[in-house]
């Protein structure tokens, strides 16, 4: 991602990495950063809120990131819209929560 080349290490990249390591097991955090380094460009405050925001939806950040690490690239509003669509049986596929996690 080209924006990584001009991002501030101390001002942006390290704080994001610190938050990822705080909210996820180290192996998952490192895997996500290795596969999707642009996650370090995310707003630190949003990354900090993500575990609770997902918990409010009945989702566990660690479990979700093990299966779908790209979720860290999305903001919670987008995640919630997609999640609600997947659960909706009139407009969406009407999956149950367990199926959504698969």
Image: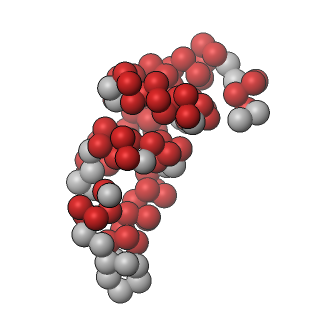
Is residue 43 or residue 36 the one in the foreground? 36
Q: Position of residue 98 (x, y in %)?
A: 23, 61
Task: Decide if residue 26 is in sight here.
Answer: yes
Q: Is residue 17 above or below residue 53?
A: above
Q: Quadrant of the N terminus?
A: top right
Q: Quadrant of residue 83?
A: bottom left
Task: Decide if residue 19 is in sight here.
Answer: no
| Residue occupying image coordinates x 32% and y 58% | 102
| Residue occupying image coordinates x 31% and y 38% | 62
Is residue 11 or residue 87 the one in the foreground? 87
Q: Quadrant of residue 101?
A: bottom left
Q: Is residue 4 above or below residue 62?
A: above
Q: Position of residue 55 (x, y in %)?
A: 26, 47
| Residue occupying image coordinates x 50% and y 45% | 70
Q: Is residue 99 above or below residue 49?
A: below
Q: Is residue 45 left or right of residue 42?
A: left
| Residue occupying image coordinates x 63% and y 16% | 9
């Amino acid at each position: 991602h080209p924006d990584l080349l001009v991002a501030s290490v101390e001002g942006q990249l390290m704080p994001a990495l610190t938050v990822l390591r705080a909210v996820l097991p180290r192996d998952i955090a490192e895997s996500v950063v290795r596969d999707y380094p642009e996650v370090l460009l995310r707003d630190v405050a949003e990354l900090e809120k993500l575990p609770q925001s997902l918990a409010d939806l009945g989702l566990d950040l660690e479990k979700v990131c093990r299966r779908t690490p790209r979720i860290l690239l999305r903001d919670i509003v987008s995640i919630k819209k997609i999640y609600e669509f997947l659960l909706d049986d009139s407009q969406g596929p009407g999956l149950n929560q367990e199926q959504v996690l698969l």
